[in-house]
Image (spheres, coloured by chain):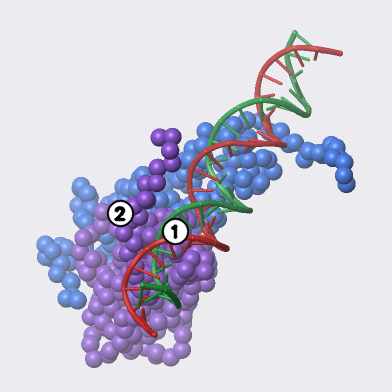
Chain colours: A purple, B blue, C green, D red
Amino acid sequence: MNRKTPVKRVRAKQRRLSAVDRRSEFVTKATELFAEEGFGGGTRALAHKLGVTQPLLYRYFPSKDDLIKEVYRKVYLEPLEIGWEKVLSDRSRPLRVRLQEFYEIYTDAIFNRRWLRIYLYSGLKGLDINRWYVGMVKDKILTRILRECRHDAGLATQGRPSAEELELAWVFHGGIFYYGVRKYIYEAPVLEDKAQMISDALDIFLAGFERMAESATDRRRAPIKVAG
Amino acid sequence: MNRKTPVKRVRAKQRRLSAVDRRSEFVTKATELFAEEGFGGGTRALAHKLGVTQPLLYRYFPSKDDLIKEVYRKVYLEPLEIGWEKVLSDRSRPLRVRLQEFYEIYTDAIFNRRWLRIYLYSGLKGLDINRWYVGMVKDKILTRILRECRHDAGLATQGRPSAEELELAWVFHGGIFYYGVRKYIYEAPVLEDKAQMISDALDIFLAGFERMAESATDRRRAPIKVAG
DNA sequence: AACTCAGTTTATCGATCGATCACCAGAGAT
DNA sequence: ATCTCTGGTGATCGATCGATAAACTGAGTT
């Protein structure tokens, strides 16, 4: 072993891809990696997942941060492609059925390990896109649900929902969301029948909304609150 | 400037602390740091927060991981010091009042940026302590609440709650928890009156539980579910 | 057969990370 | 005044990080 053996370096069969394919493969695998390791996941580990070397990343993205932004875009925008608004607003079907179907579709889209973990990691970073998403949920989902509920209860559907109504909807929505967190982040045992969980949650939400609507018609402000 | 000036290196006034004080100061500041930066936060940044040098950390902790474990212990065990069970189980007071008070105390303890962020970060790491905490919530809080609810509704309080009951309680609990996440993690606007939010959430949960209890006495299994 | 050019690799840089070691400093005991 | 014990510092190591520069490779064009 005193001679520098010219081993010819059997290079792993270099798999060439088109630029667009390679780029999207980077984003896909980066989503997987960052979902597991957080955004601190290394560029070398990412390259390894693709079976390429690390500097190749920088032919497609100026920096790791740009790659991360692409991951955000993909993760946040992907589930939005399904048309939600229609399901909620189609008044030819009963409200209860619409809500059930909407939340089954919505949770089918976001209840998976990848989406939830990326969402939580990005939330902890306090990025604008996360605030944008929360605002979107409020405007496109909760406000719409409340409007339909008011319509269904024979109330005026004008203007914005009250802060208390909105909070009610948030607690309901958050309760369902937390089911996904428990199952896919904490990996805790949950009620297997997701549709049943949604149905039960809807039962109590709708009952609660009716109760609130009734007391709101009686008095101007419902003094339900019990002193702590 | 051609001579090596012996500037005498005015060393920052070395603030000596007792071993126990310094150690606990490390844990406290580490909690702050890790809450903001995640557990990837650097040991040098931590030392800087104490106004000491980085190697000093290793006189008190064998490794960064041991420090992290200490942070876990402190964060997870601190809010447990308040006696919860008593508030929930004191049947001399109305159930509604007990639940309201319990959740006000509980959320006072955990609804702050530090606790919630450490909790989420540790949850994403999938550590045992996180599973332990979730199990604790289930056994010490939700199961107890359900037992009191059953007692209040004149039902049998034997044995474990059904999976569906438990899920109902989880959705309720998760809805309240998500209020804290929205406020302190997403920093989104929330209904300012936390007690009001708890009161409203309790209203719909209790109404929902009664409904469920009624249908459970009628039929053996409530076929409420609407096909999706 | 020689040329071209886009996809990929090798080698390496500077910064930062957790961790180790030898040494320093100062309050209390003798 | 000296010794001792302990909290604290300075210097530095090896590993790993994101990023850059230059060289290589091979299918398509001429």
Q: Which residue is drawn at 39% across and 89% down?
A: A157
Q: How crowded is mark 2: few (under 14 residues within 10 Å), some or many (20 or more)?
A: some
Kind of residue at disc 1: Gln
Looking at the picture, how far across and down is residue B118, in whole percent? 48, 52
Q: Which residue is drawn at 15% across and 67% down?
A: B222
Looking at the picture, how far across and down is residue B116, in whole percent? 48, 56
Residue placed under numbered mark 2 in the picture: A187
Instruction: Report the number of discs.
Output: 2
Kind of residue at disc 2: Glu
- The residue furthest left is B220
- Left or right? Give the position of D4 relative to D2: left
Q: What element carries label 1?
A: helix
* Gap in angstroms between the C-alphas marked 1 and 2: 32 Å
The residue lying toward the viewer, choosing from B36 and D19, is D19
Q: In which quarter of the image is residue B201?
A: bottom left
The residue lying toward the viewer, choosing from B65 and A204, is B65
Residue B161 at least partly seen: yes
Residue placed under numbered mark 1 in the picture: A54
Looking at the picture, how far across and down is residue B134, in whole percent? 35, 50
Q: Residue at x 31, y 59 (%)?
A: A13
Q: Residue at x 32, y 51 (%)?
A: B138
The residue lying toward the viewer, choosing from D6 and A14, is A14
Quarter occupied by the C terminus of chain B = bottom left
- Left or right? Give the position of A172 relative to B225: right
The residue lying toward the viewer, choosing from B1 and D16, is B1
- Report the chain holding disc 1: A
Looking at the picture, how far across and down is residue B217, in whole percent? 15, 62
Up the image or down, A213 lies above or below B153; here it is: below
The disc at residue B100 is: none
- Report the chain holding disc 2: A
